[in-house]
Image (cartoon, grey):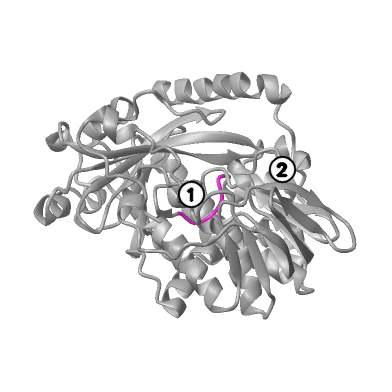
Amino acid sequence: MNTTANATSSSTTAERRVEPAATGTPHAASYYAATAHPAPPRPPLAGRERADVCVVGAGFSGLATALSLAERGYHVVVLEAARVGWGASGRNGGQIVNGYSRDLDVVEKRYGTAAAEALGSMAFEGGDIIRERAARYGIDCDLREGGVFAALNRRQLHELEGQVASWQRFGHSGLELLDEQGIRHHTNTGLYVGGLLDRWGGHIHPLNLALGEAAALEGLGGVIHEDSPVTEVVSGATPTVRTADGAVEADHVVVCGNAYLGHAVPALRDKVMPVSTQVIATEPLGEETARRLMPAGTCVEDCNYMLDYYRMTADHRLLFGGGTVYGGTTPANIIGKLRPHLARTFPEIANVRIDYAWSGNFALTLTRIPHLGRLHDRVYFTHGYSGHGVTTTHLAGRLIAEAIDGEPERFDAFASLRNYPFPGGRLLRVPLSVLGSWYYQAREKLGL
């Protein structure tokens, strides 16, 4: 699977993408692709197949759904346009962040108490699913415990105090507020005034998690076809999913393309907006430096609207992410964009060599709440995790499996929430979103 060449210290080489090879679509030239476990070839779909469930997409959403169904005895066929974990699932920051992109008090104000209680009861389940799967199937994905939200000012620290109260209401007891000295145990910088430790958070090698889940699925009889972009999903009594070279007939279909679905399902195309985020990985810093900079081995994200997030990898590199581009385009110079943020956080490694730099898209909803639903009685979809995809994808997969298996109550708690289109449609949604982000960034600079 690793047809991607290692990036070097040169900015140009580190950010380049490898052109598709004869063996199929390669992964982005990321740290994850360079350190991924070996994976078997998975041939494209050729001809017609039959399944209980056909899943579109072999990212976390598709794999979590397929594995949850296979564990219940269903025969599942997964169609992936590129490679297992090729999109956001294999490129993200690797942080297990609990909750949703909107706090539960916002959910309650917008949708009511019943909706907040339903979503609140599930807000921490995604991380548990990851841990359960890693343990059950022996998935080596560098799992480390603990995640920190870092406050750059007193206003943000006060908001974290409110978040503690909200989360504790729904049974999340693994929280600890940190003062200015306490947070230095997690990130040894003078940048923050305090923070919040979530002991139920953590971090992983996301591509290796995806590859491990794919292997687990195949061990239960599931089938994955790579390099099989879907051209059409046909609803009906027996839904059919078509590619250029074949088709899968199934009792149910689950669409999990998220930001990389393309035009295969027109009804979903305008429900989310692709947004890119960027990540860099330094040269190995050595265990001593890594422990000095981040003594506890947890991961960190700050509380800004345009946030920075970072952690140490298993081989003692600093993996640093941030930046947002609405519409899903990749900046011309990822290293140039992120290095000043790294330098501000850890001045002593301001000029460290950057070995990898890459970009990836996630899907944003206007509400910032994951969008789950049905296109037809037998065709389900899930997308729009709005930056919280590592955990909520795994939750969504379990909920869809429950619904297909005759237990739709928890799935319907999400499916019943109204999803709003972006103002301005496809033409204006990006500039209007940019204007909105400028507003929130201006408020942060003014301390409002």
Q: Is residue 128 above or below residue 419?
A: below
136 left or right, relative to 112? left
254 left or right, relative to 16? right
**Is residue 113 at least partly visible in the picture?**
no
- Split into 4 quadrants, where in the image is the N terminus? bottom left
Expressed as whole percent of the image width and height from the top left, the position of residue 301 reads 37, 44
Span colored in magenta: 97-101
Residue 90, label in figure: none
252 left or right, relative to 384? right
Is 98 colored magenta in this rendering? yes
Q: Secondary structure at mark 2?
A: loop
In the picture of the structure, the residue carrying the numbered disc 1 is 24
Expressed as whole percent of the image width and height from the top left, the position of residue 430 reads 60, 23
Is 90 colored magenta in this rendering? no
Image-quadrant location for residue 10: top left
Q: Amino acid at mark 2?
A: Ala
Residue depicted at 40% across the width and 22% down the height = 445
In the picture of the structure, the residue carrying the numbered disc 2 is 264
246 left or right, relative to 44? right
Q: Residues within 10 Å of mark 2 (few under 14, many from 20)?
A: many
Asked if the residue under mark 2 is in contact with the one under mark 1, i.e. CB atoms within 8 Å, the reply is no
Q: Main secondary structure of the magenta part?
A: loop
Front-most of residues 408 and 239: 239
Front-most of residues 136 and 16: 16
Q: Amino acid at mark 1?
A: Gly
Expressed as whole percent of the image width and height from the top left, the position of residue 231 reads 72, 45
Q: Is residue 130 above or below residue 438?
A: below
